[in-house]
Image: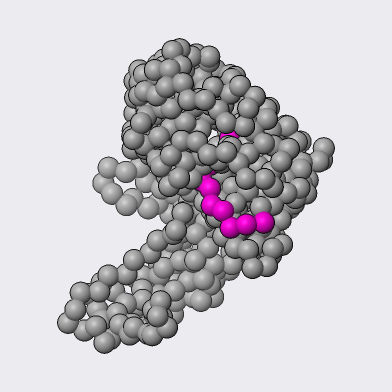
Amino acid sequence: SPVEDSATDTAEPVTFEQLAEGCSPGTATADPLALATSISVTADAPGVPFMEIVDVDIDGQEAWAVGQGGLVLGAIAVDGTMTQAYRDPGQGRYHRVELSDDLVFLVHRDFGIEARPRDKLGEPGARLGGPGDEGMAVVGDRLFVANRERGTVVYALDGTALPTELGSGGGGAATWDLAAAGEDHLLAADNIEGIVVIDVSSPDSPTVLTTVDVGGSTYDIAVDGDYAYAAAGGDGVVVLDVRDPSAPVPVAWANTGGSAVSVAVSTGVLWVADHSSISAWDVSDPVSPSPIGWEEVQQFALGIGAHPTGAVLGDWGYFEAWTLDRSVSAPALDTPLDGLRAANGVAETTIHNRGQGDLVLADALAEGAAVWVSAATIPPGASATLRVVYEDAVPGSVCVGTNDPDHPTLTLAISADGDEAPVGEVAPDFTLPTVTGDTVRLSEQLGHPVMLSYFATW
């Protein structure tokens, strides 16, 4: 029979129901979101490292991507699949890519911008700008560049290989991306200030009008008609009404489940890359974004571009084309796949439904334990708690039958509280190689402070 769980005195009690014993796959529909093409940008050029893709831009049937290893170009077919059309032979490194009719602009914040003719990609490009250049936007015959020291720098595009600088002015503190809102305004996705509104009605002297507080940093921004969509990290995607581009108003948020870092919009669909997943959202009503599809990615999704039949994703070492079937509705199960932590007779995890159809948890099986859920049917965008209750030994795993297309049966490991060293206990010993070929052992550092540093080169 159902039981109530009142975690606090003020919280509404949650009613749990016990799932039937078993682990049988439910009736799953087709998945609306599908990986159509996956191109390894490492395996195709042995000896030439292309460690990651960090930005993607789409123009018509062409998908452009940059990162460690230079530039890669994909040709998008009518059915949404993609073939690789060009790849840099060298070992260049870029952070952003932007396109004009004739040129492709590649930027690295250490040296500035390289402008290459789109029909002569293999030839060296002209250099402009300098250190601190980051986000870019092409608007008509102007190239706008966010520079960390100079603010917004403006260049005239006159059909030559080397744009002419017109002037510079106000900008954000650490702008990663720029997007045009109307003819006279730019929106800057800023890693410190959120959204910065820049008046460019006088191209030679841009000025900051206002800063929009969205609760934190933003990393990418796309404008579609009267609305803008900003990737705001762990806060998901913030939707802003830009009918008055001088004063954008946040009107909605979309929780992607990860750290939203790149966004793109096409034909009423918002696409989001958030490190661990790709998701598609229905924004035909922008103030009420609703999930369509969600999928885990192979590596580390950092850049995304959209076109009418799908999206192109930069997934670290993979250049991918994704398609979307709007006629299909299916759930999308998201839960920490590293398992459940057991303590005091209980192990719990949260299951999210990031798809468009109801997620049904049909039954579950854990040896010597009962499995309870706060909801056996999880609506789109909602979540439920899965609870394993045991009396004696900790079950090794729990298996759940679902109607998710990717996880018709979901098996999660269960580990006891004592499986890892708690805070304050002696850390397990380990060795690490040094850059000179020697080794360092943790136990040999007893009596000395030890700091472990995790970082990436991009």
Q: Nearer the viewer, residue 62 or 159?
A: 159
Instruction: Give the image quarter of residue 424.
Output: bottom left
Does residue 458 lie above or below 176 as drawn? below
96 within the magenta span: yes
Q: Who's the residue at 68% across and 59% down the image? A: 40
Q: Who's the residue at 40% across and 61% down the image? A: 455
Q: Nearer the viewer, residue 14 or 441?
A: 441
Image coords of residue 403 (percent x, y): 67, 53
Instruction: Give the image quarter of residue 103.
Output: top right
Does residue 89 lie above or below 379 as drawn? below
Q: Nearer the viewer, residue 224 or 29?
A: 224
Q: Is residue 103 toward the left or the right of residue 334 in the image?
A: right
Q: Is residue 60 toward the left or the right of residue 204 in the image?
A: right
Does residue 328 lie above or below 209 as drawn? below
Outermost residue to the bottom: 444
Image coords of residue 298 (percent x, y): 61, 59
Q: Who's the residue at 62% across and 32% down the image? A: 161
Numbered range of the magenta stretch: 89-99
Q: Nearer the viewer, residue 349 or 163?
A: 163
Q: Is residue 252 toward the left or the right of residue 334 in the image?
A: left
Image coords of residue 175 (percent x, y): 41, 35
Outermost residue to the right: 78
134 within the magenta span: no
Q: Who's the residue at 65% across and 42% down the image? A: 64
Image coords of residue 310 (percent x, y): 71, 38
User: How was the colour assigned to the protein in this rendering?
Assistant: one colour
Task: Kindly tell me whether residue 264 is visible in this rendering.
Answer: no
User: Overall secondary structure of the magenta stretch?
Assistant: loop
